[in-house]
Amino acid sequence: MFHVIMAIGRIVLQMLVTTRQNPGFNQIVWAASTLLISGSILYWLVLAQWSQAIVTWILGAQYTTYASLYWLLGLVPVPWALTLILGVAFQAMEQPKQQFLGNLRACKLALPVSLILTVWGGITGVISAMLFWCILVTVHMGILYRHTVRVSVSGERGKYVIQPVSESPSA
């Protein structure tokens, strides 16, 4: 699923670069986010429903003890899809600093929690730590996107103009 999300992200980046000064920028960001999140949820539902059969078919019988964890692992692409699209939007606006700050702030918060989850939870803790980190990055990137992009309604009905804001919120 990650490869599909990355491939669609590259396509969306090209679309956003060509429309970054146009009113359709924000609509493309949210349409791509909706598409990728919907696909990720569908992927999660398939994994959650048929994880035992999938693990047995692909990996063999010796790994079926971990099949019960695939529902948790399948949740990781859901927040990651939104994180990728927001990161692509920052790249299209030539604001890589915002993408870096979102990842850095999330890492500062997630690292101690992830280490504890890994030590105490074993393989379940590792998967939970991955999900926790993805959610934190998504939240930070969303906050930075909201502060970086100001959407103002122009004179035409339903037409939006995206204007980058020079200042970002402090850590």
Image (cartoon, grey):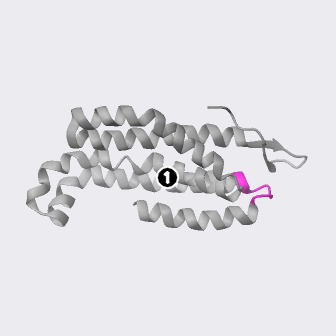
The region drawn magenta spans 20-26
Q: In this image, 117 relative to 26: left or right?
A: left
Q: Which residue is mark 1?
A: 81
Left or right of residue 143, residue 7 in this image: left
Asked whether residue 75 is drawn in magenta, I would say: no
- Counting from the top left corner in percent of width and height, residue 168 is at 71, 38
Where does the image place residue 99, in percent across and percent down from the top left? 60, 48
Which residue is pictured at 48% across the width and 52% down the height? Answer: 38
Residue furthest out toward the left? 62
| Residue name at image x 44 percent, y 44 percent | 134
SS category of the residue bearing label 1: helix
In this view, the residue in front, 2 or 123, is 123
**Please, is residue 99 above or below residue 57 in the view?**
above
Q: Amino acid at mark 1?
A: Ala
The image quadrant that residue 113 belongs to is: top left
Q: Is residue 136 visible?
A: no
User: Tag 1: Cα neighbours inside 10 Å, few (<14), some, or many (≥20)?
Assistant: many
Quarter holding the N terminus is bottom left
Residue 66's x, y, as percent?
A: 17, 49
| Residue at 47 percent of width and 35 percent of height | 108
Q: Residue at x 30, y 44 (%)?
A: 127
Q: Between residues 86 and 55, which one lies in front from this camera angle?
A: 86
Residue 22 falls inside the magenta stretch: yes
Image vertical order of residue 42 relative to residue 15, above or below: above
Who is closer to the viewer here, 133 or 170? 170
Report the side of 63 relative to 152 (left or right).
left
Q: Position of residue 149 (x, y in %)?
A: 73, 44
